[in-house]
Amino acid sequence: MPEAKNISSSVAASPNTRRPLRIALFGFGTVGSSVARILVDSKPEGLELTHIYNRNVARKKADWIPASVTWTEDAEALLTSPEIDVIVELVGGLDPAGVWVERALAAGKSVVSANKKLIALKGVELENLAVSTGGHLKFGAAVAGGIPVIPGLEQGLSGDRIRSILGILNGTCNFILSKMQTGGEYATVLAEAQAKGYAEADPTEDVGGFDARSKLAILMRLAMRVEVDPEGIARQPITAVSAVDFSYARDLGCTIRQVARAEQKDGAVAASVGPVLVAAQSPLAWSRGTENMVILNGQYGGNVVFSGHGAGGHPTAVAVVSDLLALAYDSRRVRVPSKPAAVDAEFESAHYIRFTVKDRPGIVAEITGALAKEKINIRAIVQKEGFAESALPFVVTVEPCKASALDRALAAIRSQDYLIEPPLNLQILE
Amino acid sequence: MPEAKNISSSVAASPNTRRPLRIALFGFGTVGSSVARILVDSKPEGLELTHIYNRNVARKKADWIPASVTWTEDAEALLTSPEIDVIVELVGGLDPAGVWVERALAAGKSVVSANKKLIALKGVELENLAVSTGGHLKFGAAVAGGIPVIPGLEQGLSGDRIRSILGILNGTCNFILSKMQTGGEYATVLAEAQAKGYAEADPTEDVGGFDARSKLAILMRLAMRVEVDPEGIARQPITAVSAVDFSYARDLGCTIRQVARAEQKDGAVAASVGPVLVAAQSPLAWSRGTENMVILNGQYGGNVVFSGHGAGGHPTAVAVVSDLLALAYDSRRVRVPSKPAAVDAEFESAHYIRFTVKDRPGIVAEITGALAKEKINIRAIVQKEGFAESALPFVVTVEPCKASALDRALAAIRSQDYLIEPPLNLQILE
């Protein structure tokens, strides 16, 4: 422990003035093997891979890993081993990975983690633990993988006050939606994403918005300095979007993306994750396939856009190795204070609402009446030809209004017998 | 000196555990007053503005600056004053600003500078000086102002090997060219840029490519780890581009931007700055007005794109204040070793060549003959209607070839009597 402490408080200007950081890699999957690949091939100064933990070493062991590296199935032993300075946690999830991170930090080690769920839920607590023991916690790979949004925020935008975040933070959803944009129903495109390894067998974590929600909570803390409960962030699955919505969106000059959105205004904090209409000419529509994008709006600096490969073994591994190099160079995080805050989804936004109805006279009058009651102005009513009267989709777009007012209007309509499925309500970003 | 040394080697985890860094601002122009504005309004923890140097205090003195701040016209006295921890150098140029930076570092102080010319020419030397005295040199504002490219590179991409850089690094040129794209000749648009304060009375530094060249040299060192002589980077002024080129570019599905470009391949380093044809659908064409953009291509992480406001008081001030916060949090730079390298402009690229000729039979045969002699394949010959035969512009595009081969072919043509101005030769980025 005094050993580890000595490392973290060293004042060396370059890592070559002391022995390399000894690294234990936890998890040898896609990202873990990419991290090992970069460390072995690039040999970054100041870093030495010494241990690899995996549940099943016999199955994972790779012949290109130098013989000097110890493979083990005993995670516990590594957490307090005096031979190790840094744990790279790529296992994911809260248990056991979260427990391991905590124990490593408690032992005065530093931790580099790509675990968005853990950092979103327990980041502050773990950082405080690190400060108390002299370790360091870095998690540049937890959000947007190979795109340096976290270092960009901490090191380059700490002087600004970020007022809003717009993010395409989940590559799986972006692949699915940008593919649906060129034709194809959700189920077909999901199957393709699964075949390509872009989507899990159970895609809920991604398509349900859980993954993006964790990442958004992390960005909100670093950018807006608010600590919110990630589970309190409103989320809408992309599964509700179908080909007909892309067709209507195109007529409106838009396309659809899963957008993680947060805004701080007059002390209130709003955040949401879900499918959103974005202008076809806007930066958010540029990102195709599994790309990620983050747009930060600062009071002083205006908009800053980051984009690139948010996931995948190699891009994520770049973020991990960069965090390791920062540790080797004693580059501490710029950890500006944050505060707990409540979060709602009360954006003031234009909306796209698709109703699918069994047609009969008077439906439009009833819907527009319910909207009028909440003082919501209608922008357009669009109905494409070629659908059966028994399941007729048509779209109402409304001028910017509070989300809660629209929710009330839709709740009043929801029980009507003419609706054959619940209305699909999407924000329009302008 | 022991005082300053104590600060720079402190191991505090948060700036609030010690007294704030005392800051002397050198230069109270657009950026300087924005830095002061953020420090006064936002009061970032750990930072205290104590001195402002300006050549003419009576003219600059602002009533919103707290009375606790000392105004002075005596720069020299501040450089060694024990009351000051950090010098913020916003004066620009090599002399006296460069001398001041050197003297401040020699006195063990830290320096935050936005001086691209100084950093491009003397960055390595000044960093080594800082390491030897225990000071720190930060220059996040020197390239792309409010866009965190430098921190993104140092902190988030150090784990990658960057193979190429494409940058829109000069807001003045981007304003002029993106405006010419929508119609208008160079002289008219330049006058508008000057009226808006986007261009200097003498615009040579910007339109000639000198400014972007310094910035590119800085990025090349941090990204590719090569130290090149900025004055050795090939440069072509944007003044040679006229409305007719935008018209031809449009027919080719392109537009024109000033692009700073560098590539590392098989040990050779190529770099250039100048007007370039970029696909209308490519990210480089997205940037409008004074925006900047940087696209880095990494061996492991693929493309990462940064964009935003590269200049202007507030965005640049965000970068300066962020650097100050990094100093306050003991966040040292990740300074991976770089090596001196030779640089040429030997890109393998497609080209657009506009010939303006006094028409007579046989011209095309002579030009294509000269290209054939260098084994350069022609892609297209385009000639728009409506020009006088006495000054007829037409365009030849060629398949990717070595820059030197094309230069030889054009040198052979250059002396021909039918040319009424030298051919305009632009790279086409694909």
Image (cartoon, coloured by chain):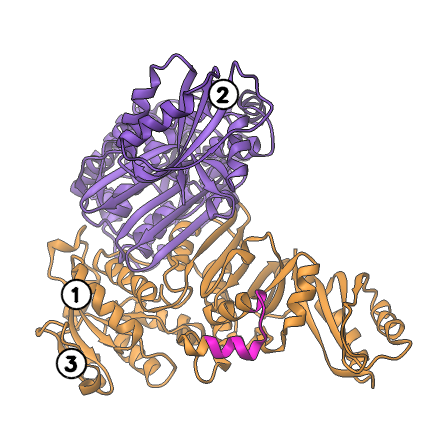
Chain colours: A orange, B purple
**Residue B124 at x, y = what percent?**
21, 38
The quadrant of the picture occupied by the C terminus of chain B is top left
Q: For the point 16% across and 78% down, which residue is it?
A: A81
**Residue B299 at x, y = what percent?**
28, 56
Three-letter code, disc 2? Ala
Highlighted range, magenta: A180-192
Queried whether the magenta region covers residue A183, the answer comes back as yes
Q: Quadrant of residue B293?
A: top left
Q: Secondary structure at mark 2?
A: helix
Q: Are circles 3 and 2 on residues that touch, CB within 8 Å?
A: no
Q: Chain of mark 3?
A: A
Q: How many other residues sit within 10 Å of disc 1, few (<14), some (14-19) or many (≥20)?
A: some
User: Is residue B218 left or right of B276 when viewed as pictured?
Assistant: left
Q: Which one is in front, B343 or B382? A: B382
**Residue A273 at x, y = what percent?**
57, 70
**Residue A104 at x, y = what percent?**
26, 77
